Image (cartoon, rainbow, N blue to C red):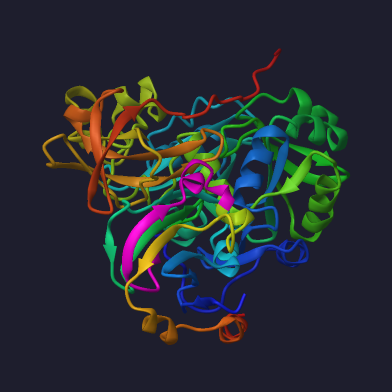
Amino acid sequence: MSEPAAGPLKTTPLHALHVELGAKMVPFAGYDMPVQYPAGVLAEHLHTRAAAGLFDVSHMGQAWLEGPDHNAVAAALEALVPGDIRDLAPGAIRYTLLLNGKGGILDDLMVTRTKKDGVLFLVVNAACKDADFAHIEKHLPAGIALRRIEDRALIALQGPKAVDVFARFAPEAAEQAFMTGVEMNVAGFACIVSRSGYTGEDGYEVSVADKDAVALARKLLGEAEVGPIGLGARDSLRLEAGLCLYGHDIDETTTPVEGALTWTISKRRREEGNFPGAKIILDQIANGAPRKRVGLLPEGKAPAREGTEITDASGKKIGIVTSGGYGPSVGGPIAMGYVEAGFAKVDTGVELMVRGKGRPAKVAAMPFVTKRFHKPGK
Amino acid sequence: MSDIRYTDQHEWVRVDGDIATIGITDYAQEQLGDVVFVELPEVGKELAAGDEAAVVESVKAASEVYSPVSGEVVDVNGDIETTPAGVNEDAMGDGWFVKLRLADPAELDKLMDEAAYNEFVESLQ
């Protein structure tokens, strides 16, 4: 699903702004996207952790899921995901997974219960959006409809200074709790503001009308703390935060239990057991999965990239790296990957086969950096 | 500067007596972006022209550095192992990778001179 679509590349409403800012543009999920700006991946990464970074994530898929009331629309979505949608409070966001019948992950997504009864706001991965929306539509009962949002951009502002910057344009966002999404005006533009992100930092993800996107981005970039951040740093930031990249760290062949995402399945959903692949997933929760996604910390300095074989001390293959590289804030190589169940405990010694040589590494707890999400009252 | 030769893989080689110093070009470091790791060969290793001499990794990806000429490794640049960013800062100078004892000076004739390399780089842009 991560392969770029054939044919001409699509552009986001911020495309001309990226070019103006000197971005290096690359194809990603069928879009012409900024991989880095003149500052470079390393500086952009560190800037986001130190101040605030602005990301164009307009390529991601946005949609409304609408029904007569919350319980009806929640039940329709719960038939496709293992997350608790029914008990979401108005304005709350849930990270959950679209599953196939074998418990494999079709995509990961964010679901917001809007304050309008019977309306959920969905954000899915760019490379999966067409397949996701077709899958959801195919399985909806009568009276529930998916409405794709084709005229809204998505801009993320992430980092410890994101709140200070954002509050200048939307004072009510300052006290917004993490993992909530509400409609509010930002610099006079009507937005859906989610306090969430993909960097391990505090911050916001803002859905804004295409026609207002450039003006809003320019306002945010005009603040001293804010720099533009490309997909390169987005990837190293999320890797340090231990967050999955769909199509790499999770896919149709991995279950939530294998992907270390069991926490996304609430007690009620486990008891009800009425999500796709529930039999397999509940069995794995009870009896363990054959493999598990873990963090990996190489002991030397050589990064281990995606596809690197993981072996035990005797050289027997026990797994594979699914994301790996250099963590700028860690100051060394980091990775995540799948290992056989017996090797998944933190501090287990393994070897990473980089350029034909086994290099020692340890299974490590994730995130690799301390998360700094906003909690109300702090 | 006329004693510097270049490959189409963006390595450079500068010869002083029978010692050839090898590095990657400024164009290469710019394309790679921030260098975060280099892996250098053992001193004493024999390299043939075109052999993998070293590995350079940026935040984005790993790339091989191929030896433009044949010879025995007589020195490696430990400074860029400790501080890989040195490759970005001075790719053509202090950011060198490997010194070889040149086995066959005639191999240099197969490589590009500075004018030819500059033209080659321009053709890529």
Looking at the rendering, which quadrant does residue B91 occupy? bottom right
Closer to the camera, B48 or A276? B48
**Residue B56 percent across, percent down from the top left:** 44, 56
State yes or no: residue B25 in magenta: no
Quick one: quadrant of the C terminus of chain B? bottom right
Q: Left or right: A212 with respect to A41?
A: right
Q: What's the residue at 56%, 62% (across, down)?
A: B29
Q: Position of residue B41 (x, y in %)?
A: 33, 54
Q: Observer-nearest residue: A102 or A19?
A: A19
The image shows residue B92 at horizontal and vertical percentages of: 58, 64
Q: Quadrant of residue A178?
A: top right
Above or below residue A121? Residue A285 is above
Q: What range is drawn magenta here?
A: B65-86
Left or right, A76 with respect to A16, comes to left
Instruction: Note whether A250 is above or below B103 in the view shown.
Output: above
Number of disc labels: 0
In the rendered view, does B18 fall on the left or right side of A373?
left
Residue at screen point 70% across, 43% down? A53
Q: Residue at x 40, y 73 (%)?
A: B68
**Furthest residue toward front:** B17
Q: Is residue A262 among the parts visible in the rendering?
A: yes
User: Magenta span has B84?
Assistant: yes
Q: Residue placed farthest to the top in the image?
A: A377
Locate the N terminus of chain B by quadrant: bottom right
Question: Residue, x 57% and y 57% (percent of image)?
Answer: B33
Residue A92 at what x, y percent from top left? 60, 29
Is residue A60 visible to us here?
no
- Report the front residue among A244 and B85: B85
